[in-house]
Structures are given as C-alpha cells and as structure tokens.
Image (cartoon, rainbow, N blue to C red):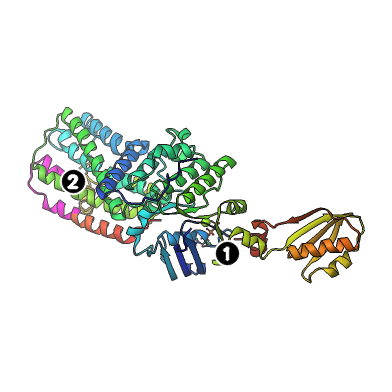
Amino acid sequence: MGNESVVQVTGLVKRYGSKTAVDGLDLRVRTGTVTAVLGPNGAGKTTTIETCEGYRRPDAGTVRVLGLDPVREAGALRPRIGVMLQSGGVYSGARANEMLRHMAKLHAHPLDVGALIERLGLESCGRTTYRRLSGGQQQRLALAMAVVGRPELVFLDEPTAGLDPQARRATWDLVRDLRADGVSVILTTHHMDEAEQLADEVAIIDAGKVIAEGTPEALCRGGAENTLRFSGRPGLDVGSLLKALPPDSAAAELTPGAYRVSGTVDPQLLATVTSWCAQHGVMPEKIAVERHTLEDVFLELTGKELRG
Amino acid sequence: MSAAGTYTPKPGAAPLSRMIAAQAALETKMLLRNGEQLLLTVVIPTLLLVLFSAVDIVDTGKGEAVDFLAPGILALAVMSTAFTGQAIATGFERRYGVLKRLGASPLPRWALMAAKTLSVLVTEVLQIVLLTVIAFALGWSPHGNPFAVLLLLVLGTAAFSGLGLLMAGTLKAEATLAAANLVFLLLLVGGGVIVPLDKFPDAAQSVLGLLPISALSDGLRDVLQHGAGMPWGDLGILAVWAVVGLGAAGKFFRWE
Ligand SMILES: Nc1ncnc2c1ncn2[C@@H]1O[C@H](COP(=O)(O)OP(=O)(O)OP(=O)(O)O)[C@@H](O)[C@H]1O
Ligand SMILES: [Mg+2]
C-alpha cells in the first residue's frame, strides 16, 4: 500500500438545477487500497463516483484520478479505469459472453474472458440475452466488464446490490484478489458488513459531504458508544457503580442479575467495573465487551429517518 | 481462487481500427438479431417490391412496374436502416446506459459514431444485394451512372442518420420508437416510394418533393429508370438535410 493517491477530490460541488447533490466533498483514495463509500439513498455517492469517472463536470472543486482531469483528459484516463455503473450498460439483445468479449476487444491486454466467466458463474447464462438475465446475473456481468481490461483503478457502484449470499462472497473474493494484485478499488454499498469485510478505508457521505472517514476499526472505536455486559447477584447497587464510572457512562440492571454498562468502553473502564465488583464481593460472570458495528456507527451519524 | 498476478494492472486501449471494427460488428449483430428491426429493414421492403411489382395496385406510369418500384424500394431500404432502425436502436442504447457505459471504455465517442455508421453501411449493402437480386428476378432493367447512384445512397444515408440520431439523442426511447415508426409510414406513403408523387395535388407535391425520402427515391429513379446523369437537384436537397441533421444531432445529442 503506497502513500500516493489514485483519487483526489477536493471541495467537489455538483448541482442538478437548484438541487445540490454534492456539497464540498473531499475524498482521497490511496493506491492499492479498497475504499468503501457509504451513505443513505440520495447522499451523493453515485454523483461523486460518476464525476471521478468523467461523466460529470464539477461545478466547483477539483477532481484528479490517476493524476488526470477526468473530463479534460478522458482519453488518457479511460483505458486505465474499470467502471461498473449502478445499473444498465449492456445491449438488451447481447449475450453475457458476447458483451464481455466485446469489452475485452476494446483493451490491449485483457483478462482471459473464459476464466472470468467461469469465476463469476456466468457460463450458465449461455445464449440468454441480457434483458432476460436475472438481476444478479446482470450485476455479475457488469462487474466482469469493469475488470476485464486489467485496469489500475476500478469503480464499483453498488456491486452486490441484489446478489445472493454466494454471489456476494464471490464478488468479495474478486475484490480481495484485485487488491492483492495491486488494483485500487472504490466501491459504494449499503451493506455495512461488506464495508467491514472488504474496505481498508471507509467514507460515510451524507447530504453531499463526507461526515466520517477512516478504517472500519477506527470508525467503530471512536464515535459510537460501546457496551459492557456482565451477570452477578440480582439487586446490586447500580447507583454506586455509576458513581465509580466516568461521567459519560450509564449503568442498568436489564433483567434481574443482568447488568449493562455503556459509555467509552476502554481498558480503564473495564478495570473500574471489575474493581467495583471486587469491593462489593461480586463475581462478574459472562463479562463481555461488545464492540459496536459499523451499522451502529452509521445509524448514529446519519440518523434513523428515511431519506428522500 | 486465482493465480496471484492474474489481475495485475496492464491497462491500454486496443488499436483504434480494431475497436471500431469490433464495435461495428457487434452493432450489426444486434441489429440482425432483432426481429422488429429485420421486419423493418428486410421484410417490409422485400414484400412491397414483390407485391407491387406483381399486382397492379398503384398506377406506376408507363413501363415495367419494377423499373419504377426498385429505385423507390432502395430509397426505402436506406431510410429503414439509417433513420428508423438506427433511431430506435440508439434510443434504447441511450435509455439502457449502453452509450454511457461505452463512454467510459477506451472507445472514443467519435469512434463509436464511426462504428455505427459502418454498421449502417454494412446493413445497407446486405439490403441492396438482396433487393437487387429480387428486382432482377422480377425483370428489372436498370440504367445510368453507378457513381451517381452511389453518391445518392451515401448522401441519403448521411441525411437519414442525422435525423435518426437527432431523434434518438433528444427524445425518450419510447417516443423515439413511436415517432420513428410513424415517420417511416408517412414517408413511405408520401415520399414517392411506391406511390408516384404526381398522384398528389400540385401544392402538396412541391412540399413533399423537398423531403429527403422524395429526393432520394426521385434521384435514384432519374438515374436508374431514366438514365439521367447527375441528379443535382436531389443531391442538393439531400446535402442540405445531411448538414442540418448531422449538425443538429451533434449539437443536441445527449448521451444519458
Ligand atoms: N441526473 C440527475 N438529475 C437531477 N437530480 C439528480 C440526478 N442524479 C442525481 N440526482 C439527485 O442528486 C442526489 C444525489 O444522487 P446520487 O445518485 O448521487 O445518490 P446516491 O448516494 O448514489 O444514492 P443511492 O444510494 O440511492 O444510489 C439525489 O437527491 C438525486 O435525486
Ligand atoms: Mg447511487
């Protein structure tokens, strides 16, 4: 993993008429990493990605992809990137292998098409034309089209939307193999587990701005509260426990004998709880620290209401 | 899952000529696979040629009916491919994101348009071979300057392509489908293809005569039926349509 960046977005603004879809967004993708862009529906993920792909001209800010301006230097950039659109992109009358072979012909050193078809389970599509393929087969074909030209950088807009668990895992494996071979990947997803599994870096976008970024671990550690649970005698004095804890903590007996402490759960807090137990002659059984998931963090940051 | 190094980046565009040839081949294959397109480009012109040569439905003037009909049907074939077929196919490619996706591939946009033109020309050659063979079987005896015929066909193709792409690049796919078929029907009837223009009232004739289909069928007929030299008037009309159509398509075409 180098320290150079393949994508450098600074202060990007993109408007559609009076609607501001992207509102001063900064994003950096380091070479050789997988970056996941998360965000509620309409947050501006696709707009941001498509600006990087050269489809849209920024209203303000700068976008550099592989050091190039995606609009002005499109000719130099396009052979070097792989693109999977959020939907569509294939002739409705084309067969999967026909379309993939065609994309391969547009590149100088394409992957072995047969092997790629086999790897993504597309051989069963046979002579079926695109419009009759299942949604998941269409997605896998679009993914194959994005990688067949042996790009340096791949943009995947919701690559696993609508995939069954097997196909999702096959997609994850492919993304991991791409990274292992030095390809940089930027993907969007609504699956938090996918981002946790795959991404080196996560950027959470809301209302056209990045509101949090970092490794999945760092995001889960910071921000959201974590939880510590233990069981002991019913009816312990929770108030006295609370006094021993830092001010931002909470403690409760959920059901008789089951206790929950929430707050910034770090080794210090764990020590405080166990020493309080020792002072009160309590053996804290089944003591467990629950790390918050990316989904908890995401919901905490972006709220629970539905987006338009 | 796969050997290490399988995906090691090795980017690069294929040579332009290979990209254009591949794109043109794929576009032609898509067209020949599409039932409605075949109906439009092959079945309808063939049926009209055979039917109207065999049965005296319209009065085609003196001489063999096929000598009048064959040039008109050739004009119809050009219109069906360059205008109707291309408009409908391109409209749906735009709707389904094909044009958008190809826009992110190494194939430049002008090369995509060149490939589309090549595919139209290949289809027209196939149509013309088929229709010529049938017309000969029906007793056709063409005259005239092959170079004039070629020039008419090329300018006609340019004029119809411009109009077809203008429609495909600005209207919704469904609107393009409906409008392109409607225009095809109207021009088939009112463009001197099977019904001679002199069957219409004088006022209508002078307007209809300016349509690209009338200029193409009239020009082809002047040469192939009457052995005229260069039909400059008709070539001029087609050239104006081509410049206006392609210019407007270039300006207003939207890729998404
Ligand atoms: N072509 C367009 N014309 C007008 N408005 C648009 C256009 N594309 C997107 N928008 C608007 O811009 C905002 C951002 O859209 P975008 O597609 O970037 O969101 P997204 O984060 O990809 O959402 P999703 O998760 O649903 O795919 C939305 O409010 C959307 O309605
Ligand atoms: Mg999107």
Query: x, y percentage for residue A293?
Result: 67, 56
In this picture, residue A76 sits left or right of residue A29: left
Residue A51 seen from this side? yes
- The answer to whether A237 is drawn above or below residue B155 in the figure is below
Q: Main secondary structure of the magenta part?
A: helix
Q: Give the letter of the chain under mark 1.
A: A
Q: Does the magenta stretch include residue B60?
A: no
Mark 1 or 2: the one toward you? 1
* Amino acid at dot 1: Glu
Looking at the rendered structure, the secondary structure element under dot 1 is strand
Location of mark 1 (residue):
A213
| In magenta segment, residue B233 | yes
Which residue is more in the foreground, B206 or B102?
Answer: B102
Is A50 situated above or below B80? Answer: below
Along the line of sight, which residue is nearer the eye, A166 or A29? A29
In the picture shown, does residue B185 fall above or below A297?
above
Residue A58 visible to an observer of this rendering: no
- Comparing B180 with A33, the one in front is A33
Left or right, B249 with respect to A174, comes to left
The C terminus of chain B sits in image quarter: bottom left
Query: How busy is the neighbourhood of tag 1: few (under 14 within 10 Å), some, or many (20 plus)?
Result: some
* Residue A44 placement (x, y as % from top left): 52, 62
Q: Position of residue A206 (x, y in %)?
A: 58, 64
Q: Label 2 is found on which chain of the structure?
A: B
* Secondary structure of the residue carrying numbered label 2: helix
Alpha carbon separation for disc pair 1 and 2: 60 Å
Disc sitting over residue B153 in the figure: 2
Q: Which span is picked out in magenta?
A: B220-238
Q: Residue A34's spot in the image, x, y percent?
A: 51, 55
Side (left or right) of A94 relative to B233? right
